[in-house]
Image (spheres, helix red, strand yellow):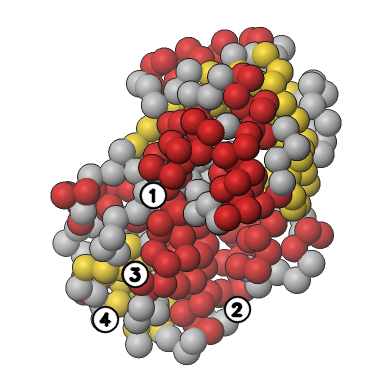
Amino acid sequence: MKINIIGAGPAGVSAAYRAIKEGHDVTIYEKEKVLAKKPCGEASFSEIEQLTPFSKFDKQDFILAKFRKALVYINHNFVSELKMPFQCYVFNKSRFLEEYLEYAEALGVKVKRGTLVTENSDVWKEEMVIDATGYIRMSRFAKQQCPKVIPVLRAYTDNNKIINDDEILIDIIGPGYFWIFPYDNLYNVGYGGHINSGDVKTILNECIKHYNLTVKSRIDGAGIVVSGPPKRLIYGNIRLAGESMGAVNAGTGEGIRFSLYAGMMAIDNDYEKKFWKMHGENLKRCVKFGGIFLSLKPEQFKKIFDDASPELMMTLVDGKKLNLKTGLQLLFKDPSLFFKYIKS
């Protein structure tokens, strides 16, 4: 089958790699000449190791930091140190995608960079088209389920050693959070929230000043979907993947992992059913719990997450259903939050 893929982000590249390995004739179109132009935190869980062709993933040159600790602040006041139950990575997203795409090209994927696919292009008429262009496409196809999009700003700053290289910093401020991730000899910093872009910029600049950081790049902005995926992912010959179908954790802002999953599944006949069973319900649950998470008072946050079991932490972070064990743990820690989570 001939398959056109629009967009060479995580979803588009993983879709191309999977499709070419299945024996399809694949062409990928990317409007930019350089990949990963959209700004993000460039971090993900070690789970992405199994979603790429790289052997010894943690040894790849695009890996810039490995962490298992998150220092959590609320309004600049330290609250808790979260110990992650697994390895997490910060990486150069552009280099990651370029190297991933090389694997796909070596197998025969044709890549057309600097090619903007317009609405009337014949590219959309191929037997199968995987649309990995971003949330605008989701708005076009799922008008009855228009996605909620929030502004995010990101910059690179000097590394002033405010955190160790094996930890990250999260500062919950208002309806969003500021982050500091180690990025080789720099920091990847940013803020995203449920407010207008002007206020996002104000908070970002205040945080940069508060943490005594010096900006070493321009400040880039983007919008991310925080309403989760729509039920429908297939429209005739077109399949939505990545942020085109809201593959973002609304609580944490993480999207790379879910976009890789969506890309790998997109050619399957049961794509919608498979993605929803594996991630859809969880991502929708994150939409509701994300707001609850951001509204927690410092003493609540500390009580819930201090000494939380790995299972409970992942349930809350990834929007998983409570089972008997994690339900009892959360009920014991905070009954009111337990009932709010059940409702979500």
Q: Can residue 314 be seen in this view?
A: no
Rate crowding at label 2 as few (under 14), some (14 to 19) or many (20 or more) other CA atoms within 10 Å: few
Whether tag 4 and tag 1 are in contact, CB under 8 A, the answer is: no
- Closest to the observer: 285 or 225? 285
Please indicate whether residue 132 sits to the left or right of residue 237 in the image: right
Q: Which label sits in the foreground, 4 or 2?
A: 4
Whether tag 3 and tag 4 are in contact, CB under 8 A, the answer is: no
| Comes first in the chain, label 2 or label 1 | 2
Identity of the amino acid at label 2?
A: Ala
Q: Position of residue 321 (x, y in %)?
A: 50, 54
For residue 119, which quarter of the picture?
Answer: bottom left
At 56% from the left and 48% from the top, the residue drawn is: 327
Q: Is residue 261 visible?
A: yes
Residue 24, above or below 316: below
Q: How far apart are marks 2 and 1 (CA)?
A: 37 Å
| Comes first in the chain, label 3 or label 4 | 4
Which residue matches tag 4? 127
Q: Distance between the residues labelled 3 and 1?
A: 15 Å
Q: Where is residue 55 in the image (x, y as percent from the top left)?
A: 75, 71
| Comes first in the chain, label 3 or label 1 | 3
| Comes first in the chain, label 4 or label 2 | 2
Q: Which label sits in the foreground, 2 or 1?
A: 1
At 34% from the left and 69% from the top, the residue drawn is: 272
Which residue matches tag 2? 106
Q: Distance between the residues labelled 3 and 4?
A: 18 Å
Q: Which label sits in the foreground, 3 or 1?
A: 1
